[in-house]
Image (cartoon, helix red, strand yellow):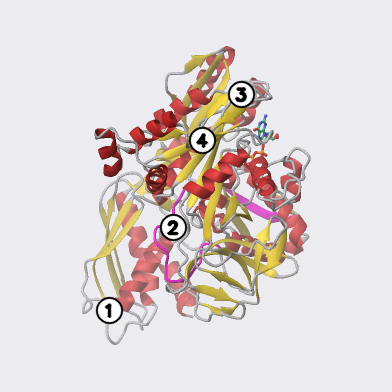
Amino acid sequence: MDGQELKKGAKLICAGLLAHADAGKTTLTEQLLYLAGAIRKAGSVDDGTAQTDWLDVERRRGISVRAASSRLTLGDTAVNLIDTPGHADFSGEVERSLGALDGAVLLLSAVEGVQAQTKLIWKAMETLNLPGIIFLNKIDRAGSGCKKVLSQLTREFPGSRFFPMQSVRGEGEIDAAVSGPDWEDSSFQEHLLLELADFDPEMEEAVLNEEQPPLPKLQDSLKRAVAARQMTPVFFGSAKTGVGCRELLDGMVSLLPPASQDTDAPLSGLVYKVEYDPVMGKAAHIRLFGGKLQNRDPVPVLGQEEPEKITQIRRRMGEKAQDIGEITAGDIGVVYGLSKIKTGDIIGAEPVNRACSIAAPLLQVQVYPEKPEELPALVEALRQLSDEDPLLDLLWLPEERELHIKITGVIQLEVLEELIAQRFGLKAAFSKPTVIYKETPAHEGIGYESYTWPKPCWAQVELKIEPLPRGSGIQYESAIKEKQIFYRYQNHIKTSVFQNLKQGVYGWEVTDAKITLIGGSHHTIHTHPLDFFVATPVALLDGLTKCGSILLEPMLAVQMTAPEEVLGRVLGDITAMRGEFDTPVIANGEFTLEARIPAADSIDYPITFRSLTSGKGLYSTRFDGYQECPLELGKTCPRRGVDPLDRAKWILWARNAITG
Ligand code: GDP
């Protein structure tokens, strides 16, 4: 491995490799690292020697479960390459990595084409305005259909323009090859010019005047169109045979936008990943957008009072690492010494448009230690793990002595079990995963609480609750002036509303509602500082009960491809699972089908589907929002803790717990 240092004035690119599972990301990363001279020999996923898959479970199962970063240098350009997991269970890791990127290579298999996970990633790239190029991989495999996948892309992502940069020969054969991009070729230039003319007035004028602009102008125009997401160039190849990988690497370096490297800008960074190093402790992977960070610098983290100091800064190359002493704007690095750091933390000024949500943990499980005396150690272990993966949303109920976490799928659980065993030496067991329902008010209502007894206390709260359309989430507003309720108490009300929306009338999190503080009062003498934390939950639950609740269940958009003879059975299964389906598309003895199925009824269906199709079928899912569910088909969730509607008991308990 060479120094990979960034020369002065050199260009820097932070690019991600994004794809559905098995598209060939890890294989491609090996090729790119090898081509750039960062490793001497490309490792193989199939032999368990890939640089970036170094957790035991990754090598054993042949899947990547975490994002891994590598650095490669090509001429004057350094590329930080983040290889992300493709399996839907680890979308949380993809979501977090997206915030660190300036561009992406979206990988598709030319055999399997657009998958549910591809659509999810594309949507996230749109939300973040993240430019990309596409690599159609596996052109050497039987069944490769580049033309078919290109038209599928255009159909699935309307409004986006895909431009093939190369032509493919011998597709579907072991010696499949690519030619181009041939910049000198006049017909390639003409094609490109015609495409660019739709976005670039200068190119449009050239077309009208029947002129061919000089090549550098054409290339600059293409770069601008890529950066603005007006065009997505498509490259072709085989990560396995190495065909097309060099061209892709050149394409990345020349077409993806460089990072802004303004070290004079105010410090601004994002912790896109936290891991644990057995020797060094917490390792925070940081993307810096402005300023710089050096060894021994105190790091200002949003929401943290006392900044902690950096003890070391390293650069990662798969399993290996090298000391670099500082990170400058635009770059990424791994920072040690920050014991309180969590994934998603912001350093300095908040970066713009770096957050998106593609992962939705739809399942919850209870975690038990195999040996009861290990419960405290297990709580601590899960606390550490949820600093790394905040979507686990750890819930520890000390009175009930229960631990609950949220997960995206059962493979994630298998990985967690192994991590807990390896890292903490603990054996954990899990309950059967159950679906996470939500609830929403059925109609408008008002909740009220007057907490003025037993003295000394005074907090009156009146809340209006209104239903909002599906997918809106929660909105909160105050219609009350400072003289009626001091702003500091209004803040308590707001905080308490959000805390207590976690458990509605059916015991599930309340969503799609607007809560407005419309009345109430404080008392300048009697109000005790935390009285509003006692009164607000009662007012909220009073209101929610009056509104009536509707149960909501998570839905999955499912995409299936399988031999035609099982179509009848699959359609019957979808109906039995309360799902709906679109007209199946049948070609070459196979059908492709899109369906929308409640998650609760289809948790185990991938297993049934696999045996039904003798492993030949493709089954991919993505979360597709919450939908109303009849109470008798769903589930309520037992209330945890004291019920605020059991008012007398609640007040006694809350006075002790909150104010005592
Ligand atoms: P990932 O899950 O996207 O990281 O995909 P991997 O790199 O682990 O590859 C999945 C499987 O596809 C492995 O068995 C690879 O050997 C195989 N594979 C990857 N790229 C190609 C390719 O271009 N052609 C062929 N024939 N197989 C490939």
Q: Amino acid at mark 3?
A: Gly
In screen coordinates, is 319 left or right of 170?
A: right
Q: Which sits earlier in the primary sequence, circle 3 or circle 1?
A: 1
- Please tell me in which quarter of the rendered image ligand 1 is found: top right
Q: Is there CB contact under 8 Å for labels 4 and 1?
A: no
Disc 2 element: loop
Q: Is residue 166 above or below residue 83?
A: above
Mark count = 4
> Which residue is the site of mark 3?
617
Q: Which sits earlier in the primary sequence, circle 4 or circle 2?
A: 4
Q: Is residue 163 above or below residue 541?
A: above
> Which residue is depicted at the point 27% across and 63% down?
477
> Which residue is depicted at the point 55% across and 67% down?
8
The picture places residue 277, in percent across and down from the top left corner, at 71, 65
Mark nearest the camera among 3 and 1 is 3
Main secondary-structure element of the magenta-colored stretch:
loop
The quadrant of the rendering that contains the N terminus is bottom right
Q: Amino acid at mark 4?
A: Pro
How far apart in space, not on screen, are marks 4 and 1 (Cα)?
66 Å
Query: Is residue 435 visible from the viewing direction of this image?
Result: no
> Which residue is the site of mark 4?
181
> Which residue is the site of mark 2?
354
Mark nearest the camera among 4 and 3 is 4
Residue stretch rendered in magenta on the structure: 343-371
> Which residue is the site of mark 1?
486
Binning the other alpha carbons within 10 Å of mark 4 as few (below 14), some (14 to 19) or many (20 upward) gives: some
How far apart in space, not on screen, are marks 2 and 3 (Cα)?
36 Å
